[in-house]
Image: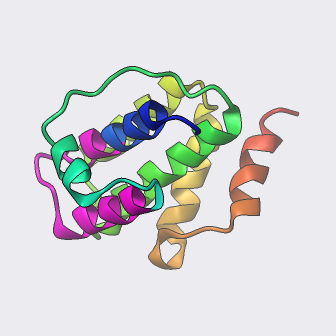
Amino acid sequence: MNTFEEKRSLLLEMIAFSTVDGYLHKREYDFLAIIANELSFEIDVFKDLFHQELPQLPIKSEFLRIQQFYRLALLMYCDGILHEKETTAILQIAIDMGLNPIATKRILKLMNGAPNAIIDGEVLLNVFQEQHN
């Protein structure tokens, strides 16, 4: 993720996903603000993203697609309320990204049973690697 447009696209996707249940929880907003800061977005630029449309920029590498899926999953769990619309949306997003549906369901199940929905990065990558064999 090198260009401003790629970073912007990822953050816009996360913003769109955060409101799929019809509500932006404060924890979701705070999580998005942390991600925006890590991506070197100024606070004014970050706030302006909430008023922009989602561009369709494909994520090229599988590793980056897995990373974005995991960010979206963390966002889904961060407000402590799991909505059916969120689950349906994240599974569709994963399919659109070209990620294995079995692996994504396993990751969501692991996150559901983990404290704070956080799983080890090696576990995350191993679940996707297992599906390649």
Q: Does the rendering let one see residue 88?
A: no
Camera-nearest residue between 45 and 110 = 45
> Viewer-proximal residue, 28 or 115?
28
Is residue 38 placed above or below 19 in the rendered structure?
below
Rendered view: 122 above or below 60:
below
Observer-nearest residue: 58 or 43? 43
| Quadrant of the image occupied by residue 86 | top left
Residue at 30% from the left image edge and 56% from the top image edge: 42
Instruction: Tell me which residue sits at (45%, 22%) in the image.
Output: 57
Q: Residue at x 58, y 62 (%)?
A: 110
Residue 19 position in % (x across, y down): 19, 46
113 with respect to 88 (left or right): right
Which stretch did the figure color magenta?
A: 14-37
Above or below: residue 10 compared with residue 78:
above
Residue in the image at 68% along x and 33% along y = 62
Q: Quadrant of the N terminus?
A: top right
- As rendered, which of 85 and 23 lies closer to the eye? 23
Q: Is residue 123 left or right of residue 31?
A: right
Q: Is residue 24 left or right of residue 72?
A: left
For residue 125, above or below residue 117: above
Quadrant assignment, res 114: bottom right
Quarter of the image where one finds residue 40? bottom left
Residue 54 picture location, percent across and down: 28, 27
The residue sitting at the right extreme is: 133
Check residue 4 for magenta coloring: no
What secondary structure is the magenta-colored segment mainly? helix
| Colouring scheme applied when the structure was drawn | rainbow
